[in-house]
Image (cartoon, grey):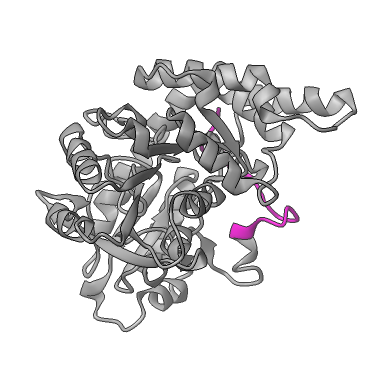
Amino acid sequence: MDFSQTISRDNTYSLKWLKYQGQDILPMWVADTEFSCAQPILDALHKRVGHGILGYTHPSQYAPANEAVKHWLKKQYNWDIELEWIVWTPGVVPAFNLACRAFCEPGDKVMVQSPNYPPMLAAPAINKMERVDIDTVEVDGRWTLDFAQLEKEAQDPKVKMFILCNPMNPVGSVLTEAELKEVARICQENDIFLCSDEIHCDLVLDQQAKHIPAGTLAGVESQTITLMAASKTFNIAGLGTSFAIIPDAKLRFQYNHAGMGLLPWANIMGLVATEAAFTECDHWHKVLLDYLRGNRDYLYQEINAIEGLRMLLPQATYLAWVDASGLNVPLPQKYFEDKGVGPSPGADFGNKQFIRLNYGCPRSHLEHAIQRIKA
């Protein structure tokens, strides 16, 4: 559990590191971390590979993974689910694209908060729908939804779905109970499906904040699906495994039917890793959160001490949304790359004057980045 260890990703064909291959630029963009998986996950994967046969396994029949999800949601969020509510998917991105197909028609409107990570912004158009952006606003030093705009846009009868991202990516906020109740009220009153991407829910760093799954909100159980995964927290995104929680049987049928012949099953290695993550890695998870809090606090202090840069303290994730408008440069992304640091360009998320910086890395890596930015 040495999160300060630097692990070379040479010759691993890492998407994150190949982007700047051959350049003296630290990659701090796509949302995977520089941390090794917890040992119980690696042991479970070794054991499964050691069996030697990797044939078909239907996720609904892999009881240990389903029981692990049920156990985790009860322990983390006091959410009692039924096993049949779980629908396994090969990633959260295909999961919310499938939701568009399942619950909307071409030409419908889909609300998406902005800024947001690129695949979510792209989902409506991919499915021949119109995207309606709901702005993110700063209130008392924290990013949140523009609820007045949400209420107004929701009244359009062409709007059929709201894809929510909570905790919010890239801004890092965790929506409060009052905020989520307002989201639920607006969706209920306007007959709008709520699809909640909660892939970062197990990465809440603010010890005063509490993640509340959308599926627990009263009154919208029959129009809500909740998307989760162990992938971001436990750094197993490459195994392509996530799950949706859909309490309503009719919605569950629609969702499964829409994916027939299109989406592959979540694979056996991802199921094994998820099982281990949710049953054997509690201490690793706790130490990870402590380490990320330290990284977040260090980055917050350093970034806000640099003239022209500003960031709000994220409540969750390992991603910092940095306002670079004070630099007065046309392309902040190029400015950082010229300094030898490769963040995600804010333009991809909806605001070209920002950058998103991944601090899920050893502290030395982060300190090196800050030195370069200051130089």
Residue 328 placement: quadrant: bottom left
Identify the residue shown where x is 57% and y is 69%: 24
Q: Which residues are magenta?
A: 1-16
Residue 168 pos. (x, y %)? 33, 48
- Number of numbered discs visible in the structure rendering: 0
Residue 11 counted in the magenta span: yes
Identify the residue shown where x is 41% and y is 52%: 367
Question: Is 146 situated left or right of 110 in this image?
Answer: left
Residue 184 pos. (x, y %)? 23, 39
In this rendered view, identify the residue nearer to me: 200 or 160. Answer: 160
User: Does residue 146 sit above or below 233 in this rendering?
Assistant: below
User: Does residue 10 sit above or below 62 in this rendering?
Assistant: below
Report the quarter where the N terminus lies: top right
Do we see residue 353 in this rendering?
Answer: yes
Report the quarter where the C terminus lies: bottom left
Identify the residue shown where x is 35% and y is 17%: 78
In this rendered view, identify the residue nearer to me: 56 or 50. Answer: 56
Q: Residue furthest bottom?
A: 330
Residue 148 pos. (x, y %)? 12, 56
Residue 217 placement: quadrant: top left
In this rendered view, identify the residue nearer to me: 320 or 81. Answer: 81
Residue 2 pos. (x, y %)? 55, 31
User: Does residue 150 sit above or below 188 in this rendering?
Assistant: below
In this rendered view, identify the residue nearer to me: 10 or 70. Answer: 70
Residue 332 counted in the magenta span: no
User: Does residue 329 sit above or below 284 in this rendering?
Assistant: below
Question: Is 261 situated left or right of 74 in this image?
Answer: right
